[in-house]
Structure formats: structure tokens, C-alpha cells
Amino acid sequence: MAALGDALSGGTPVLPVPADVDDRAAAHAADEIAALHRAELPHGTALVVRTSGSSGVPKAVALSAEALRSSAEATHERFGGAGQWLVALPTHLISGLQMLVRSEVSGLPPVFFDGPFDAELLLRASEVMEADRRYVSLVPVQFSRLLDLAERDRGAADALRAFDAVLVGGQSVPLELRRRAHELGIALKRSYGMTETAGGCVYDGVEIGDTRVRIRGGEVQLAGPSLALGYVGDPELTADRFVEEAGRDGATTRWYRTGDAGELLGGMLTVTGRLDRVIVSGGVNVSLDEVERAAREHAGWESAVAVGVPHPEWGERVGLVVETGGEGSLAFDEVRAALRERLGAAAAPEWATETDELPRLAGGKPDLRAIEAWISRLRDSFSETRRGRHAAEEGRA
């Protein structure tokens, strides 16, 4: 917190790194730090934050003190005032780091929840919070586990209702989670943003502070004072993702191209998925994010991840990976039929496979690269088994 306060006041820029890593990861982090020391930071850099790398190679984002403070102040303005934050997300990522910035800006010390996530222990940690207004930021998988506890424990429900805002982001919040939160009276706030916008800048579909949103070519683009300075050591990527345009009044506006697909309806933003998470199945474009969102509305499928896999006839087809569900989970055939009716035959998943626990990134997002690699190995194993059986049958013949 001292280093962060100094950086926000114009002092030495800070690169947050994970606290608990193995020797190999520590060596890699040391190499990154050395490389960033050699790199030329954009003027005004206060923090260099690594993106989570959920669907690609992590990038080093340079953020100014002005952008970070603007984001923090806009959040508190939307929530009705500054408050104390319970920190349960990694503080080397923007999701957790922004809670520290908000705490520094407000002067209210954060409360830290350390260790593996446990819903009961998190709520117990909130008991030491002393401020009149209390906030917590979570990812959907954490929020889901808190709702599970709150639905069977009245005391847990009361503790969760004591938060003036439960900010949930990092990925889309399934409709089923929103319904459950509403029934319990939880002050859920859905957040949309990224490292390049200093964290969440759209809450419940509406911009906060001086953020602006537009859709160009189906892509969500954002402008405002919380935009990053750019990517460290990658001027080409910076120029590609951050673009400047002159308006009719001659004023120049800097826009960030998110790569997300979305639409504005009645002034509210709906993010429909990643533009690069589209497969072509039988000549039909299928959004994997849209399939995921629809699948997650069904009981037991809240953790579903859609993947595209090769198909000899259709080119590509959709498959689903889901964490093993409990009682009441809808059968795959019923989910498949519902998705076929809603999204069309090309979007209907060919298969689904269960796993005890999905690989996840530090911020809680499903690790898409790890999941796709696992599915590829699984398919290779099945193919090898089939070839072995075929060879054995030919030998017996």
C-alpha cells in the first residue's frame, strides 16, 4: 500500500507481482521485471499491470495515476460514497489492485482475505470491517459459492446482504446467478472493464464517471479518463488498440478497441462475447460465448465453457466442458435441445464432458488455453484408443 500510494502521488512506478509463486514462476517474474526496467515506460506511468491472458499472451499495460484515480472515484460516485473494501481477488491483477486504489483514494484501509477461497471464511473476514459502507469485488465462481451458502444459511445471507455493493466481473454473470441474488436481496453490481480501462468502467450496462461507449463494426469501444497509456514495449499493438478520432467539433477522442462484441439497446451495453471466439460450423458463424451464456442459464451448467473442435463433415462443432454438478443438474440432451432451439442447429453442442474442477487463471476466469489443450489431448487419446481397437480387430480377422 505504501508503494502504491507513492506511485499514485507521482513517485516510482510499480509492477505488482504474485505473492505466492513457485521457483520457476519467480524466476520468470524476475526476468519480466528486468525487461520492464530496460523498457521505456510511457510518460506518466504509475503502475504496470499484466493482463490475465485468459485467451492469449499476457500484456504489460501502463496506467497513469490519473486513470486509476478517475476509475476509483467514479466507482464510489456510482455506489453512493466511499467505503471499505474486502479484498478477495489477486492484487497483481487489475480486479484486485483497483480495490487497493479505491482504498488509497478514500483513506479507508482495506480488509484482506487470504488463502484459498472459502465462502464461509470470507464472510467471517467481513466481520472485522468497521466502515459504514462496505464493498466487495468477486468473480462469478466466487459469487456462486457465496449464494450456495447463503441459500442454506440465514446468517450467511444476512452477512452477504450487509455489503452495500457486491461487484461481480471478470466474465459475464449468468442470468441464473442474477435471479438468485435478487431473491436473496443481495446488492449485486455487474462490472465490465479490463486492465486497459483501469478496471470496471461500465456497471449494470451503464457507463460510470466520464466513460463513453460506442459500437463500431460490432465491436465495443470505450473512451474516457480511465484509459491506459498503452502497452509497454509494444508501440504497434498500442497504435492498433488505442485509436484517436476527431469529432465534428474538431476535438480528438481516444478510443480503446476492446475486441468484444456487443450492442447498445436503450443506452445500455450488452456484451455478447469475444469477436475472436467465433467458429464456422457448416458455413454458419457460431459465437462460443453466446453458447456459453445460454448453457449457463440451466441448472448445473453455470460453469460451462464452450470450445470449438474439428469435425470431418461440418468443419468445426461446439463442445461443452463443465464442472461436475450436483443434484438437479439438467441432462445434456435437454441442454442440447434447448440450445438448438434457441441458437440454431450449428450451435447445438455435439458433446459435453465433466471435470471435477476447471483450470482457472489467478483472477478466477476459466483458463481457455489450458481447457482447449486438455480437450485436444483427450481427443488424441480417444483417437489412439480407437486405432488400437481397429488394429486388434483386423489382427483377429
Image (cartoon, grey):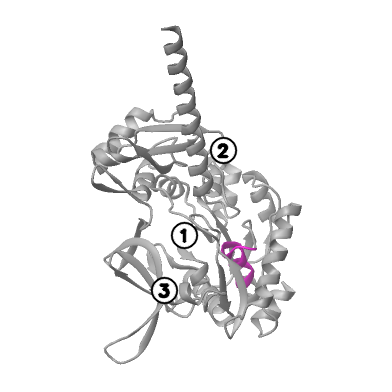
Q: Is residue 255 above or below residue 120?
A: below
Q: Secondary structure at mark 3?
A: helix
Q: Is residue 158 left or right of residue 389?
A: right
Q: Position of residue 101 (x, y in %)?
A: 62, 72
Residue at the image point whose x is 64% and y is 60% from the top = 86
Residue 100 appears in which quarter of the rendering?
Answer: bottom right
Q: Secondary structure at mark 2?
A: loop
- The residue where tag 2 is placed is 357
Quadrant containing the C terminus is top left
Quadrant containing the N terminus is bottom right
Of 179 and 347, which appears nearest the observer?
347
Give the class, few, some or many, for how many residues have Cα within 10 Å of label 2's Cα (few <14, many ≥20). Answer: few
Q: Amino acid at mark 2?
A: Glu
Q: Kindly report the distance in space between the C-alpha atoms of the residues bearing marks 2 and 1.
A: 26 Å
Q: Kindly report the distance in space between the C-alpha atoms of the residues bearing marks 3 and 2.
A: 36 Å
- Mark 3 or 2: the one toward you: 3
Of 346 and 157, which appears nearest the observer?
346
Q: Position of residue 187 (x, y in %)?
A: 48, 57
Q: Position of residue 215 (x, y in %)?
A: 30, 69
Asked whether 100 falls inside the magenta stretch, the response is yes
- Mark 2 or 1: the one toward you: 2
Question: Do the numbered discs 3 and 2 sit on residues whose CB atoms are within 8 Å?
Answer: no
Residue 21 visible in the snapshot: no
**Residues shaded magenta:** 92-102
Question: Do the numbered discs 2 and 1 sit on residues whose CB atoms are within 8 Å?
Answer: no
- The residue where tag 1 is placed is 189
Mark drawn on residue 240:
3
Residue 284 visible in the snapshot: yes
Of 96 and 385, which appears nearest the observer?
385
Q: Amino acid at mark 3?
A: Asp
- Mark 3 or 1: the one toward you: 3
